[in-house]
Image (cartoon, grey):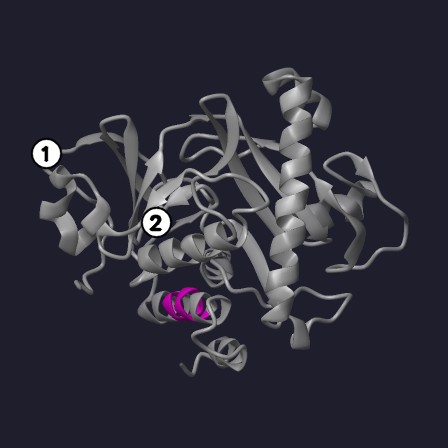
C-alpha cells in the first residue's frame, strides 16, 4: 500500500466526472468511483498542501458509519474492496486501496443538510448577535458549546469551490426540493444524527454537529458522499467538554486557526502550511478514525491535542 500523499488522481481508462474539494469522482458504467484524495480545504478554498493519510482516514470513517447506519437510511455504497471493482479499475489498485468506494449513481439534492446538537461555530456567532441560529429563535441565556434542547436542522446551499455555502430557511429548502422531500431530508438527517451521537458517546465523544448529503437513486432517498467524517462533523472529547467555552475538535480547526493567525483573507490562492500544522492535522484524522472504529482507546485523542503523537 502506497504512503504517498495524493492530492490529485489521473486514472487512465476511467472517465473523470468531476473534482471536488477533496474527492475525485470517476464514471464506471452506471456507477461511480469516488476517490478520497489527501487534499484539504479551509474556508471553502483548497489548500496547496496535502495531509498525509487524510483520504484513507476519511474513507475508513465513512465506511464505518455506513455500516452503523444501514438500518436508519439507505446509502450509495456498493463496495470498498478493489477486488470487487470493475476490471478497468484494478490497474490502479495501489492508489485506490483504502481510499476509494464504488457507489450507486444518485441525483444529488441541491442542499446540504446540517444538524446542530450544540451551540458552536457560526451558530454561536449568530446567537450572540440575534439570539437565533439560522433564523431559528432560541432561549435567552445559552452559553457557547451548550447542548441544545433538541438538535436543529439547518439546511444550506451547495457552493462551488472558492465560494461560501449559505444558510437557508426550511421554507427555502422546501422551495428548492419540494415540501415532501424537504420533510424527508429533515427527518432522516435528525435520525442519522441521533444514532451517530449515541455511537460516538459510547466511544467517549460528543458529536456537536454534522453536514449530510442526500441523493435519489431509482426514486429512493439515500445518503451519499461522506458521512460523519471530521471534514463534515465536529467531534469533542466528552471528558474535556465544558459549557461556556470553545472546545478542542478533531478536524481542520488546527489549519483554520493557523490561517487566521497569519492573516489570510480567505480568498484563493491559499498559503502553504508549515510542517507542524500538517503533522498535527494528520494525527487528528488518523486517531479519530482509530477511536471510532475501536482500534484505539479514546485516550489516544487526548494525546493528539498535546501534539505528542
Q: Report the residue at 77% width, 65% height from top.
A: 244
Looking at the rendered structure, the secondary structure element under dot 1 is loop
Q: Report the residue at 63% width, 38% height from top.
A: 188
Q: What residue is disc 1 on?
A: 13
**Which residue sits furthest right?**
140
Q: Position of residue 96 (x, y in %)?
A: 21, 51
The residue segment tinted magenta is 282-287
Q: Position of residue 276 (x, y in %)?
A: 36, 72
Residue 232 higher or lower than 20, as above or below: below
Horizontal relation, residue 150 to residue 278: left or right: right
Q: Report the residue at 31% width, 69% height from top.
A: 275
User: Within 10 Å of the Cα at label 2, are there few (<14), some (14-19), or many (20+) other Cα atoms?
Assistant: many
Point out the image quarter for the N terminus: bottom left
| Residue 263 painted magenta | no
Residue 162 higher or lower than 57, as above or below: above
Q: Report the residue at 54% width, 34% height from top.
A: 165
Q: Position of residue 283 (x, y in %)?
A: 39, 71
Q: Quadrant of residue 102?
A: top left
Q: Quadrant of residue 114?
A: top right
Point out the image quarter for the C terminus: bottom left
Q: Earlier in the sequence, mark 2 or mark 1?
A: 1
Kindly report which numbered mark, 2 or 1, lies closer to the viewer in this rendering: 1
Q: Position of residue 100 (x, y in %)?
A: 29, 48
- Tell me if residue 168 can be seen: no
Q: What residue is disc 2 on?
A: 47
Horizontal relation, residue 72 to residue 264: left or right: right
- Tell me if residue 99 can be seen: yes
Looking at the rendered structure, the secondary structure element under dot 2 is loop
Amino acid at each position: 500500500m502506497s504512503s504517498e500523499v495524493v492530492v490529485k488522481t489521473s486514472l487512465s481508462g476511467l472517465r473523470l466526472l468531476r473534482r471536488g474539494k477533496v474527492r475525485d469522482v470517476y464514471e464506471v458504467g452506471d456507477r461511480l468511483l469516488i476517490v478520497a484524495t489527501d487534499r484539504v480545504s479551509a474556508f471553502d478554498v483548497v489548500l496547496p498542501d496535502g495531509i498525509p493519510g487524510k483520504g484513507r482516514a476519511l474513507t475508513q470513517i465513512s465506511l464505518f458509519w455506513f455500516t452503523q447506519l444501514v438500518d436508519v437510511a439507505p446509502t450509495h455504497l456498493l463496495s470498498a474492496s478493489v477486488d470487487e471493482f470493475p476490471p478497468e479499475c484494478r490497474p490502479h489498485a495501489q492508489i485506490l486501496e483504502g481510499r476509494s468506494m464504488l457507489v450507486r449513481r444518485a441525483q444529488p439534492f441541491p442542499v446540504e443538510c446540517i444538524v446542530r446538537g450544540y451551540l458552536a461555530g457560526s451558530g454561536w456567532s449568530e446567537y450572540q448577535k440575534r439570539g437565533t441560529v439560522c433564523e431559528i429563535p432560541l432561549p435567552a441565556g445559552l452559553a457557547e458549546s451548550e447542548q441544545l434542547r433538541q438538535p436543529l436542522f439547518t439546511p444550506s446551499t451547495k457552493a462551488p469551490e472558492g465560494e461560501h455555502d449559505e444558510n437557508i430557511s426550511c421554507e427555502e429548502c422546501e422551495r428548492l426540493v419540494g415540501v415532501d422531500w424537504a420533510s424527508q431530508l429533515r427527518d432522516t438527517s435528525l435520525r442519522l444524527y441521533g444514532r451517530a451521537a449515541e455511537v460516538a458517546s459510547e466511544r467517549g465523544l460528543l458529536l456537536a454537529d454534522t453536514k449530510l448529503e442526500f441523493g435519489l437513486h431509482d426514486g429512493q432517498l439515500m445518503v451519499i458522499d461522506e458521512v460523519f467524517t471530521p471534514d463534515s462533523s465536529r467531534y469533542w472529547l466528552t471528558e474535556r467538554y465544558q459549557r461556556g467555552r470553545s472546545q478542542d475538535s478533531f478536524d481542520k480547526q488546527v489549519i483554520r486557526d493557523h490561517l487566521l493567525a497569519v492573516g489570510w483573507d480567505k480568498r484563493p490562492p491559499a498559503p502553504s502550511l508549515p510542517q507542524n500544522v500538517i503533522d498535527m492535522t494528520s494525527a487528528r484524522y488518523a486517531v479519530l478514525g482509530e477511536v471510532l472504529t475501536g482500534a484505539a482507546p479514546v485516550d489516544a485523542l487526548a494525546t493528539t491535542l498535546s501534539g505528542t503523537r
